[in-house]
Image (tube, rainbow, N blue to C red):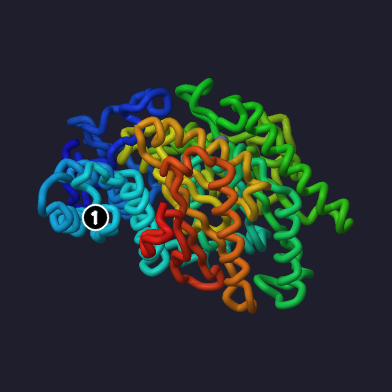
Amino acid sequence: MRRQPRERSLFWRPGAPPRQRGASRGPAGHQGARAGSGPLVRRPEAGRPTRRHALVDTEHNRRLWDYERRTKAGFDDIETVLRRIASHQFREDFVDLAQDLARRELGHELPRRLLEPAWTGGLDVRSLYAFCVFERFKRLSREFFEEDPLGGQQDQAVRRRLLELGFHAVGIAPCSDGRLAHVVSYVLRLPYRAVRRKAHAGALFDISESVRNWVAVEHLRFRSGEPNTADAPTRYLKLAVYHYSSSDPAHQGCAAHGSDDHAAASAALERLRSMREAIENRFCCGAMVDTLLIGVDTDDDSIRVHVPDADGEIGLDRYVDSRALYERTLGMEAAAARETLRLEVFEGAEKRHATPPVEGMGELVAWLVENNFAQLEYVRDCHGGRYDDIGHAERFIGVGNGFEEVQLRNLTYYAFLETLEEGAADVDVGNKIFGKLNVARGLPVPIVIRCDYDGRVPGSRDRAEARSKRIEDALHARYPEPSRKGLLATLRTLRDASGLAPSEQVGSSLELDDPAEGH
Ligand SMILES: [Zn+2]
């Protein structure tokens, strides 16, 4: 494999992409995959200047691309570097040489215990691979919280605007699919700190957990007036995100719904209705939750926003399409483009055979569609208008809660869970995906376990650590065969979610520090 050059600022020039995982590995990436060659950033055709939408911030897109490109390259370089290291395993100076290469190419050393038996032919590539993925994840976490590369900690303006529109909190429930992991920071262009994200396979979020979170949010308003007092007529917004693939709807849609768009959308809608009903039945105070349903086309990140009617009711066939609105408003001045958006959302309701949405909700829909325009140009400029990896190409599985630092498409298959029992179905789906991505090629499934805690609450950290251990043990018990063969590796991490500290490692199935405990 050719080593890719690593210059930065390649935004508008042909540049080196993160290698396209899945390019040579069967059904997951068969469509349009281009074996890792060819630039992701395409030149506009000669003589035809690329048209820019008046509502798109090009400079912001440039920063997002720089982050995506170098972060994914960091994960994808691991395999290349390990292949080179493995090719030297019978040399006498192998350990020094391997450490030298690892330091230079990956930025960290490798555990000596894994390198020393190499001359007997026993180089443990599986453990080395998992170790490097985990190191890369730790670096990702550090950079994300300490340097804020996506600007997601600048959330005050967005929170204020949400409040003005009538929403004091926003909970987003996307599908766990890695192709939606960037839904907050990229597809919808919201600062990650302004919303709460919990992913579940098929966007089938846990209603009881969502109700508990709603209670906590309302309690905070009641007791502390945060972010506003409980008598203010604002609402909690629950947003569910399903997905589909326009170019290969029968295979690259949502795995949890058998790639059936309609089933994916209606199941998510059903959850939204149930959550609203649960809160209304239990707390009997009229509608206190607004709901919104969004569909993402994972080929190009365009969105369908299902505009609620005046009563907040959502119809599966009643939506605005960001792609169509982008095309229609391209070339307009910013003000005219915004007006066209508003008209489509409010007055277009008649075409949709519905009453127009209430003011705040309609404004929110128009805002999200406008935000998505930037992502459409991003995918056009950086990924040729349609992702090469339209199928799965995640680099690791994340289980537990939190994972704010994962804001990139196809980086992580993420399953929210407190115990493995409740999230087993989601993890099974992820494991199946990685069966094709990694295990089929002899590489392990790297699973990062994350348990967030509240540093202000006594004992919270200890409980989180115990929970992470329970999840780890349950994972190895659930998949005994891969675990025994070194094809399942786990990293346990905790994070104090009350601040901006990165995640910390508290354990790993690799147990590299103490050879006596190794396997
Ligand atoms: Zn899905």
Residue plotted at (18% across, 51% down): 7
Q: Is residue 429 left or right of residue 26?
A: right
Give the percent coordinates (x, y) of residue 215.
76, 63
Residue plotted at (23% across, 54% down): 116
| Mark 1 close to ligand 1, CB under 8 Å | no
Reply above or below: 299 against 217: above
Give the percent coordinates (x, y) of residue 18.
28, 42
Q: Considering the image in quadrants, where does the N terminus appear?
A: top left
Reply above or below: 478 against 171: above
Q: Nearer the viewer, residue 402 or 221?
A: 402
Q: What residue would you read off at disc 1?
A: 106
Determine if residue 478 is in view.
yes
Reply above or below: 448 against 458: above
Element class at badge 1: helix
Q: Is residue 43 left or right of residue 295?
A: left
The amino acid at mark 1 is Leu
Q: How many marks?
A: 1
Give the percent coordinates (x, y) of residue 348.
63, 35
Q: Nearer the viewer, residue 171 or 287?
A: 171
Give the percent coordinates (x, y) of residue 482.
47, 39
Q: Is residue 330 left or right of residue 256?
A: left
- Ligand 1 visible in quadrant: top right
Query: Which of the 4 image quadrants contains residue 485?
Result: top left
Q: Nearer the viewer, residue 109 or 405?
A: 109
Determine if residue 372 is in view.
no
Q: Nearer the viewer, residue 468 or 514?
A: 514
Residue plotted at (66% across, 53% down): 360
Q: Is residue 281 left or right of residue 37?
A: right
Residue plotted at (72% across, 66% down): 216
Q: Residues within 10 Å of mark 1 (few under 14, many from 20)?
A: many
